[in-house]
């Protein structure tokens, strides 16, 4: 009986050993037929917001994430051409602060991880506000004392997120008199300032610049002239800026007889820089005149 038991134990041991060898063989075959997985880290991948609405402003924090991709060596090597699409869905979000999960899609391979996976979206209502323009001067002109600063446009429209627009307490056109050689009309950019005189970012101004008529107390004879338009387009509207020029001369006295004009003939839609033309009676020497500005901007509106 003991011999029979020993023989059975030996058979069982051999069976277990054969089963183990067979299992190792099968596993080896499976591993040999499965290509190894590779990973690749792509840092600072930009995020795209989907579903934005024009009446809202959206801020994304952070605006990029780190992505780890896994796949075969071939797929990982081609990842420059197959970059993952990373999006943040913002449709139907109300004003406020929201935490949104990043959505991803990739043509080939798998995305193992996205860091961070959740991002913050701040939604703000976009508003507009009308405000008067303040005109100020800085420095001194080398050719005369400042007599007057006059704006051609006196108000501006501010547009942007409500929080930013409400911080604007003043919109200023600042004229640098050190660059002014004579009475003239200059185009001055507008600045949106807060209560501390600092620029407010994240707002747009319409117009973004204004024409300022700078008058100096000097010995020059001068006259302001409205710019006439010749050959206006029949099928389009148009605007010119500035709409007046300052004509100056040391000797001439009848400057009011001068006509300033621009020719819009054959101009395509868009913005154009045009030289101001002068016509005058025969007794006035045009070459002795100083015209400011010498060029104006004409916009043909399609």
Image: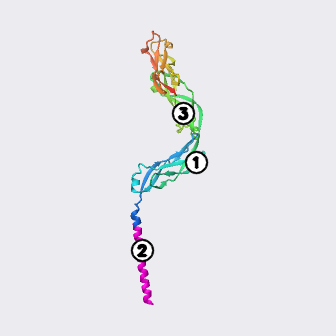
Residue 193 at what x, y percent from top left? 54, 35
Q: Secondary structure at mark 1?
A: strand
Task: Tell me the residue at 40%/73% (across/down).
Answer: 21
Farthest right residue in view: 94
Residue 141 at what x, y percent from top left? 46, 24
Residue 54 vs 33, above or below: the answer is above
Q: Is residue 219 at all visible to an observer of this figure?
A: no
The quadrant of the rendering that contains the N terminus is bottom left
Q: Secondary structure at mark 2?
A: helix
Residue 121 at what x, y percent from top left? 55, 47
Report which residue position mark 3 lands on: 205
Decide: few, some or many residues near mark 2? Use Cα within 10 Å; few <14, some 14-19, many ≥20. Answer: few
Report which residue position mark 2 lands on: 20
Q: Magenta region's main secondary structure? A: helix
Q: What is the span of residues highlighted in magenta in the rendered image?
A: 1-28
Disc 1 to disc 3, C-alpha distance:
26 Å
Q: Return the disc, 1 or 3, that comes first in the chain's sequence.
A: 1
Decide: few, some or many residues near mark 1? Use Cα within 10 Å; few <14, some 14-19, many ≥20. Answer: some
């Amino acid at each position: 009986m003991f011999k029979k038991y020993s023989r059975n134990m030996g058979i069982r041991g051999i069976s277990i050993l054969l089963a183990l060898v067979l299992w190792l063989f099968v596993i080896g075959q499976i591993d040999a037929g499965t290509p190894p997985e590779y990973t690749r880290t792509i840092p600072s991948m930009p995020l795209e917001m989907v579903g934005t609405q024009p009446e809202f402003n959206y801020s994304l924090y952070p605006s990029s994430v780190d992505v780890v991709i896994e796949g075969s060596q071939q797929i990982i090597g081609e990842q420059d051409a197959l970059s993952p699409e990373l999006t943040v869905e913002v449709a139907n979000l109300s004003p406020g602060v929201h935490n949104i999960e990043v959505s991803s899609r990739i043509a080939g391979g798998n995305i193992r991880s996205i860091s961070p996976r959740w991002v913050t979206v701040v939604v703000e209502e976009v508003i507009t506000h009308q405000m008067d323009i303040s005109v100020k001067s800085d420095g001194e002109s080398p050719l005369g004392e400042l007599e007057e600063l006059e704006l051609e446009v006196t108000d501006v429209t501010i547009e942007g997120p409500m929080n930013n627009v409400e911080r604007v307490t003043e919109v200023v056109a600042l004229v640098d008199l050190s660059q002014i050689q004579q009475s003239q009309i200059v185009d001055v950019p507008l600045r949106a300032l807060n209560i501390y005189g600092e620029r407010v970012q994240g707002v747009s101004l319409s117009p973004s610049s204004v024409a300022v008529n700078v008058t100096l107390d000097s010995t020059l004879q001068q006259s302001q002239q409205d710019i006439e338009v010749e050959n206006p387009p029949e099928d389009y509207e148009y605007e010119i800026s500035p709409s007046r020029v300052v004509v100056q001369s040391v000797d001439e006295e009848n400057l009011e007889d001068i006509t300033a004009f621009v020719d819009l003939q054959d101009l395509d839609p868009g913005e154009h820089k045009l030289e101001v033309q002068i016509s005058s009676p025969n007794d006035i020497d045009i070459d002795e005149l100083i015209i400011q500005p010498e060029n104006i901007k004409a916009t043909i509106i399609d």
